[in-house]
Amino acid sequence: LAKTTQPISMDSYEGQEVNITCSHNNIATNDYITWYQQFPSQGPRFIIQGYKTKVTNEVASLFIPADRKSSTLSLPRVSLSDTAVYYCLVGAPPSGNTPLVFGKGTRLSVIA
Amino acid sequence: DSGVTQTPKHLITATGQRVTLRCSPRSGDLSVYWYQQSLDQGLQFLIQYYNGEERAKGNILERFSAQQFPDLHSELNLSSLELGDSALYFCASSPMGGAGEDTQYFGPGTRLTVL
């Protein structure tokens, strides 16, 4: 199971772009990278998922370099409502039976 | 709304008691996961069921057990409760077994308070 490392916390002002990087040095060939967002007392919510290069949706962008040993979640022009914990997950190989396991996440605080 | 439902929303009980938490997955999802989240702690994976069978086990105590029924809903049983078991318990479901591009969808959680 690929282990992930991400910063414990980050601060940002409203309107800025925020980039959260996750390291996953032992990512397997078939692993996907998934990011979740969690607000206090709520369950995590899927944000974005990718395998390689760049993925963009209405909420965020995900940048994955060619070696796939890291990934960066980019949140454009954050607002106060983006204050949350962000989790990076890397999937187990399809032949395995271990599911995605959440780490500690990155606590993002957006300041007015 | 993720489509995953959990009952009850809140549960207050005493030490030594036993409780059952219930989860209904999204329609069509075959996997159900249980997580525990204590105050200011990350999500601790407890157990996963896939189509009625136990698929993976995490840091689940022997006092805890779970099952997934033929209609795919799941129950988490917590017995001999201790103060430290007070936490948010989340259920999640995913279409397949959890690997690759399978995505987990989380319910709103059950807040358990043990007095």
Image (spheres, coloured by chain):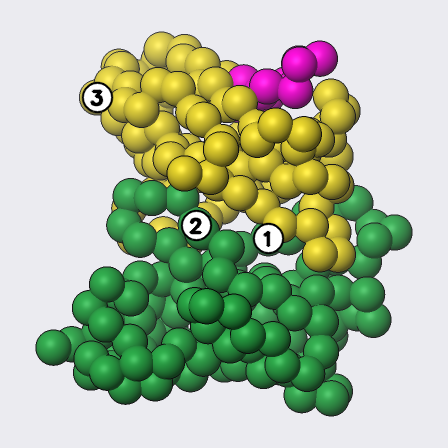
Chain A: colour as depicted = green
Q: Is residue B80 visible?
A: no
Q: Earlier in the sequence, mark 2 or mark 1?
A: 2
Q: Main secondary structure of the magenta part?
A: strand
Q: Residue at x 75, y 26 (%)?
A: B51
- Label 2 SS: loop
Which residue type carries mark 2? Pro
Q: Quadrant of residue B73?
A: top right
Q: Residue at x 67, y 29 (%)?
A: B28
Q: Quadrant for residue B75, please give it.
A: top right
Above or below for B49 versus B20: below
Q: Which residues are magenta?
A: B64-76
Q: Amino acid at mark 1?
A: Val
For disc 3, the marked residue is: B115
Label 2 or label 1, whichever lies nearer to me, is 2
* Point 21% across, 21% down: residue: B115
Q: Are marks 2 and 1 on the same chain?
A: yes
The residue where tag 2 is placed is A44
Q: Amino acid at mark 3?
A: Leu
Q: Which chain is home to disc 1? A: A
In this rendering, would A21 be left or right of A80?
right
Q: Chain B takes which shade in the image?
A: yellow
